[in-house]
Image: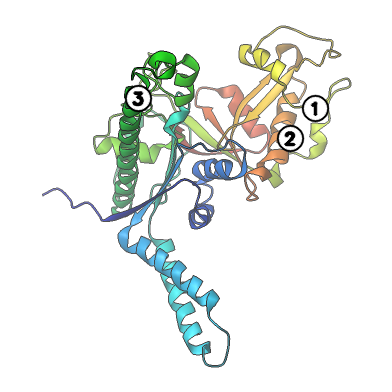
Amino acid sequence: MPPTQPKVTLLDTPTPPPHLLARLQSHLPYSLPVLRRLQFARNFPGGSTRHTHILYAAPRTACGEEEEAEAEEEELSTQRVDGNSSVSRDATGKRAGQAQAQAREAPFAAAYVDLSRGPETQVWLYCSALEDGDDGSGGSSGRQRGLAVETEEQGEGIELVLALLRRVRGIALADADADADADAEAKAPGHGNNGVVSKGEVEEMGGEEGTGRRGTMTKVLVGSLHETVRQGLLARGVAMEKSPSIPAELEWEYCGKWLFRVEDLPAASAEVLPQGMRWDRVRKEDVALVLERTSIKRRELKDGTPVAWAFMGLDGTIITLHVEEAYRRMGLAKALGCRLMREYLHEYGNDGWGAADVFVENSGSQAFCRSIGGKLSWTLSW
């Protein structure tokens, strides 16, 4: 007989619940990608949309204990402090503490979901039972790594992740129904624009041109997926396709997760620029240059044209770091990376963790990570 699926309680909220942020915080650094994405949603304008779903799954008993503990804590905080209530307060507080401790020990899974973000990353996943590290090098074949021998806890964790993915499917189907109703209304006689959806509206919704639908998608892009989680899902028959950016000759493309501690970064004195250069933010008029990643050599800096730039992603990772060819080997890459993390990571959280996802074949970026004290920690992919 197939194993019975564990009973799972799943919460779906539009904003990050404080107890989920606290649990993710306690599982750093493995929880970093999802924690940073939730912090971005909470702390930055436009960090979330009306299509955002924050998902949290835990075994039903553990989730119930956590909710009970929170309710008892609330009761405890509202009780009157006098001689007659001290015993009951102590007992209530003890029960709340015990329930919280049991809930914290149980595995859980969490996800940030926004299907309107396509073609960019739409789902970020984490599971506390599936945070085994590896050397982050990508190894040989991905099918030879991951859950070679699955423990009971890891199996329970995969079931929690599957519960999240089933909810993602439900969200997509609900979006499909809503979009179908909107299409029918738009095509009704007398409705403005004759039912035509502009390309801009389609792109905003993350759909394919000509459909304008999020929910009709049969695929979602999951970002920064830990290889242990991916292997567990593959073992259960979850279909996966490599992203279009992966070269045809590769079966899959892996990244190593490089971790940094802000306090261990090279001293701020390393950020001193050569004479004639200055720090600045990327301007709107610079975007075309950034996208082109031009190699045009510019020696004169009076026009303010950027010669090196770096960006931090929605999950707090360094996603782009580029130095124009004429200005390389001047220490600019190291200065940029350190300054970016030192000045902006605190806007996500104060835990001091920085990260970068580097393709295993990208020796240049790996060398940069080492030069600023990065540690290769685990394997992931999109």
- Crowdedness of circle 3 by 10 Å Cα count: few (<14), some, many (20+)? few
Q: Disc 1 and disc 3: Cα gap in Å?
A: 51 Å
Residue 258 lies, in percent from the top left, at 56, 36
Q: Earlier in the sequence, mark 3 or mark 2?
A: 3
- Which quadrant holds residue 301? top right
Q: Which colour scheme is used?
A: rainbow
Kindly identify which numbered label has been placed on residue 279. 1
Residue at the far right: name it: 275
Tag 3 and tag 2, C-beta contact below 8 Å: no
Tag 2 and tag 1, C-beta contact below 8 Å: yes
Q: Disc 3 and disc 2: Cα gap in Å?
A: 51 Å
Q: Out of 189 and 353, give the one closest to the viewer.
A: 189
Q: Which of marks 1 and 3 is nearer the N terminus?
A: 3
Q: Which quadrant does the C terminus fall into?
A: top left
Disc 1 marks a residue whose amino acid type is Trp
Q: Out of 134 and 47, give the one closest to the viewer.
A: 47
| Kind of element beneath mark 2 | helix
Kindly identify which numbered label has been placed on residue 307. none
The residue tagged 3 is 185
Residue 368 lies, in percent from the top left, at 65, 28
Q: Disc 2 and disc 1: Cα gap in Å?
A: 10 Å
Kindly identify which numbered label has been placed on residue 339. 2
Disc 3 marks a residue whose amino acid type is Glu
